[in-house]
Amino acid sequence: MSEPSYSGGVTIGILALQGAFAEHQTTLKKLSFERKISVVQVRTPEDLARCAALIIPGGESTTIALLAKLAGLLEPLRAFLKEKSVWGTCAGAILLAQSVEGAKKGGQELLGGISVTIARNGWGSQVESFEAPLQVQGLRDSDRPFTGVFIRAPVVLSLVPSALDPPIQVVARLPVDLLPRSDHTSSIAPDDPRTVVALRQGRHLLTTFHPELTKDSRFHEYFVRECVLPYAA
Ligand SMILES: NC(=O)CC[C@H](N)C(=O)O
């Protein structure tokens, strides 16, 4: 008898135009699940068409957007987001935002897909990069903090889901006593949207930091277990 289709493999793509895509691939390959996971690098619409889910890495969001446009990937990515799971880390999170504060009109192509507004480099420049221990809901072994690596990270300014959008679920916040000082962080309350560093909306995941730059693979496990496998055919 042939295998039922739900026991088949699942292909996860990593947008491999610029940035930390190799690190995501290395981390994903360390994991195993009840279904076989294949990991492919995505550079063309044909690569994307093979995938059940996608990770957009950190790097430089303007460069990734420009290269995606040149590769004819912008519209296929927007269509993909309407149907399949996508995780954006740092620059990838910027691309998934509905809008970016201060972006010049026509100056930054976004994919959208997650109902947030975001500020690029919201904690300051490269020298102000930092690490912080994060308490993450739903992570395996969640009492053990996850080290958030923030490199010219974006700041979530507001959560703006419409009545028709799936609700937003906050997955991790930066404790206010660990917030770096910047224009975006003077006197903010613990439940301010600017403390949100990981969130889910429906099948999509957004992290403003870089889980792929640590040896801890629990975030990748979370993405596959919570955002990919439940939705994969
Ligand atoms: N580490 C990162 O991905 C930085 C993101 C970068 N600041 C941008 O605007 O794209």
Image (tube, rainbow, N blue to C red):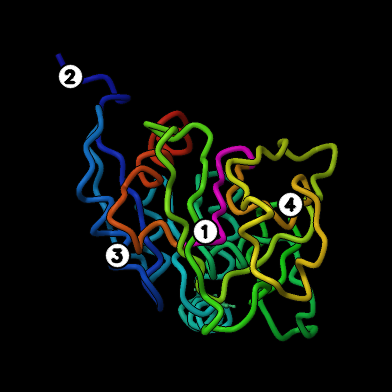
Mark 1 vs mark 2, CA separation in Å: 36 Å
Q: Amino acid at mark 2?
A: Ser
Kindly indicate the quadrant of the structure image that contains residue 154: bottom right
Kindly indicate the quadrant of the structure image that contains residue 66: bottom right
Residue sitting farthest toward the top: 1
Q: Quadrant of the N terminus?
A: top left
Which is closer to the viewer, label 2 or label 4?
4
Nearer-the-camera pick, 36 or 195: 195
Q: Is residue 227 positioned above or below 73 on the image?
A: above
Which is closer to the viewer, label 1 or label 2?
1
Mark 1 vs mark 3, CA separation in Å: 14 Å
The tag earlier along the polypeptide, 1 or 3, is: 3
Element type at mark 1: strand
Q: Which residues are magenta?
A: 201-209
User: Residue at coordinates 65% horizontally, 41% vertically from top-left?
Assistant: 170
The tag earlier along the polypeptide, 1 or 2, is: 2
User: Residue at coordinates 40% horizontally, 59% vertically from top-left?
Assistant: 48
The tag earlier along the polypeptide, 2 or 3, is: 2
User: Is 190 left, or right, of 175 in this rendering?
Assistant: right
Q: Is residue 60 magenta?
A: no
The tag earlier along the polypeptide, 2 or 4, is: 2
Q: Which residue is mark 3?
A: 23
